[in-house]
Amino acid sequence: MKQNPQDVPGRPKKFVSKEEMINNTKDNMREAEISMEFAGEEELEHLQEKNERRKHAIQRMKNEPLT
């Protein structure tokens, strides 16, 4: 099994806040929207579906309680 890069002994764990995850997802959505301008029909559909999943993921992250 491939080792997770964050689990390498001696490497500090990286903490990413919920806000940072949401912002990263929004950035990915904007980049996908730009790509859609140049995408073919099949890729366009794939990017639209992916952005729809990202919207739902952002909603889940916002509704998720802090742990």
Image (cartoon, rainbow, N blue to C red):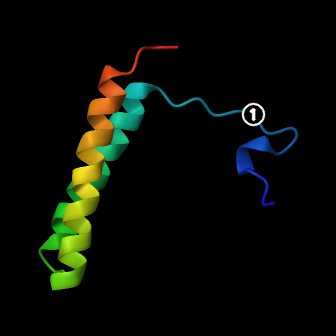
Give the camera-side residue of 1 and 39: 1
Q: Is residue 37 left or right of residue 7?
A: left
Residue 67 lies, with reference to residue 31, above or below; the image says above
In terms of image quadrants, where is residue 48? bottom left
Give the residue displayed 88% in from the left and 41% down from the top: 9
The quarter of the displayed image where residue 32 is located: bottom left
Q: Residue at x 86, y 38 (%)?
A: 10
Q: Position of residue 45 (x, y in %)?
A: 19, 73
The residue labelled by disc 1 is 12
Q: Position of residue 27 (x, y in %)?
A: 29, 49
Give me the residue at 17% from left, 62% from top. Answer: 33
Question: Mark 1 is on which residue type?
Answer: Pro
- Compared to 39, does 63 lie above or below? above
Q: Looking at the picture, how far across and down is residue 51, in whole percent?
A: 24, 55
Quarter of the picture containing the N terminus is: bottom right
**Residue at horizontal 36 percent and vertical 29 percent from the top:** 61
Q: Vertical placement of 47 versus 15: above or below?
A: below
Question: On the picture, is 31 further left or further right than 41?
Answer: right
Give the class, few, some or many, for how many residues have Cα within 10 Å of label 1's Cα (few <14, many ≥20).
few
Relative to 30, residue 39 above or below: below
